[in-house]
Amino acid sequence: MTQPANALTLRDIRRAVESGLLTIRQSIESADEAARRTQPWLHAFSYLPDSPVVNQADTGSPFAGIPIGVKDLIDTADMPTEYNSPAYAGRRPGTDSVLVARLRQAGGTILGKTVTTEFAWRHPGPTVNPWNTKHTPGGSSSGSAAAVAAGIVPLAFGTQTIGSVIRPAAYCGVVGFKPTYASIARTGVLPLAPSLDHIGLFTANVADAAYTFKVVSGGDDQDFHSSHVRRNSNGNDGSTHMRIGMLRRPVGSAMEPAQHSALMQLAARLDADGAELVTVDLPDELADMGALISAILSVEAAVVHGGLLDLSPGLVSPVMTSLINDGRGVSGVDYARARAAQVRLAHLFGHWLQAAMRLDALLVAPAPGEAPVGLSYTGDASWCAPWTFLGVPAVTLPIALGPAGLPLGAQLIGAAQHDERLLAVAEWVETRAGWQDVKLKASTSLDSTRDT
């Protein structure tokens, strides 16, 4: 197998379509051909229409000519949305989700539905990592990450309840962006835990992520879970000086040596190029978010999906069954305390990041290291969980290859409602990461560890 393709980026396609060098149909049909060519081994899509349904929009529309992958948790009126569950096989939504409606209105073409783990939890689908088919692509937005990494589409959408955008993006070597909680409307998206669920996206570079966010962001009256985070007026969105924090005590599990080395080398380059790198400690109150996350996740999953388990237990995977049963064992008092703590700690983190530490971003790992071998385990989400719980924006970008020849990433965490500032910092960091050189070198070299 070869390295993931160097396909056209979103901005490449937009320039080509607007200039007349590429027609909308040519762009979409090229992506459709790539999807069908790779589907037998990559399995990025759960559904592709018999022929692409091309959105013949005005060539000046924001997404004219852009083929888009949409996670099979997000409703599409003209395609099935089945949640990777036999209980919903053949389900056809009556309407598009708000997100899909916005994408179509902006001229985008939904190429197909991408594979998700069952209900966005841990039971995986068939998608493999495009860098090495023996490794997981991560989850739960497995197909979306793989489709962008393989160069099939320049843009795909997923969801993140714990680490389901950031982690697969890191494992597959693409940019993953999880914006501030509720900043992209979730109406028409199956929830796992509504107080934690975010819509996120995958692109080949940070600029494409920033462009996309401007088009699709915004709430909806039917998305009933209002944000527990607020904008802090102490932000320095217009400043060119960058102050980036690195945690003295990491929040995740043990980091692999290659991941640690890649992160430290990146930090040294940022420091040399003028960023102010400071070592910081999170407030003590943020030290034990794990139990709070588990309580909210399991209780809300039990509320959303418990009825299906009671009605048809044979149609629910063991891992989902376990999560539901865990939630049923949490007391109402403990759940209420966890939700109250989520709001309080989100506000505390915002004050600490901006007012106390005066940071533009935190630089942390997106995962312990390279994608694990095997497809049954989608990887460790502990490096993503705190930031999802707090509802703050996070972006990961690829920075190096590990000893197995698989991507390693860097995750940047920003202040709630300051998504644009975080993306600006991430784009600056991206120019110093050297990923394109790493990827080009890898694509032209023989790697005996790769599955051929």
Image (spheres, rainbow, N blue to C red):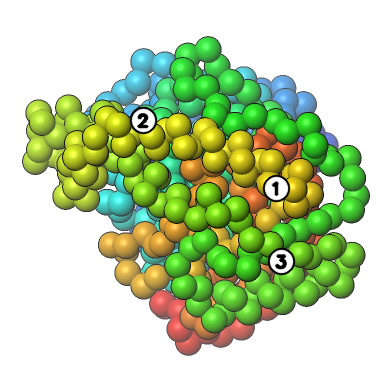
Q: Earlier in the sequence, mark 3 or mark 2?
A: 3
Q: Quadrant of residue 229?
A: top right
Label 3 packing within 10 angstroms: few (<14), some (14-19), many (20+): few
Q: Quadrant of the C terminus?
A: bottom left
Query: What kind of residue is marked 2?
Result: Ala
**Of 116 and 51, which appears nearest the observer?**
116
Q: Which residue is rendered at x = 9% and y = 28% of the image?
A: 311
Please give left or right for residue 97 compared with residue 107 in the image.
Answer: left
Judging by the rendered image, the residue that carries numbered circle 1 is 353
Query: What kind of residue is marked 1?
Result: Leu
**Of 343 and 416, which appears nearest the observer?**
343
Residue 303 in the image, given as x and y percentages of width and height: 26, 28
Q: Which residue is rendered at x = 65% and y = 37% of the image?
A: 416
Query: What kind of residue is marked 3?
Result: Thr
Q: Which residue is rendered at x = 50% and y = 55% of the image?
A: 287
Judging by the rendered image, the residue that carries numbered circle 2 is 336
Residue 279: give its label. Answer: 3
Q: 437 above or below 212?
A: below
**Of 379 and 301, which appears nearest the observer?**
301
Circle 1 SS class: helix
Circle 2 SS class: helix
Cα separation between marks 1 and 2 = 26 Å
Please give left or right for residue 89 compared with residue 159 in the image.
Answer: left
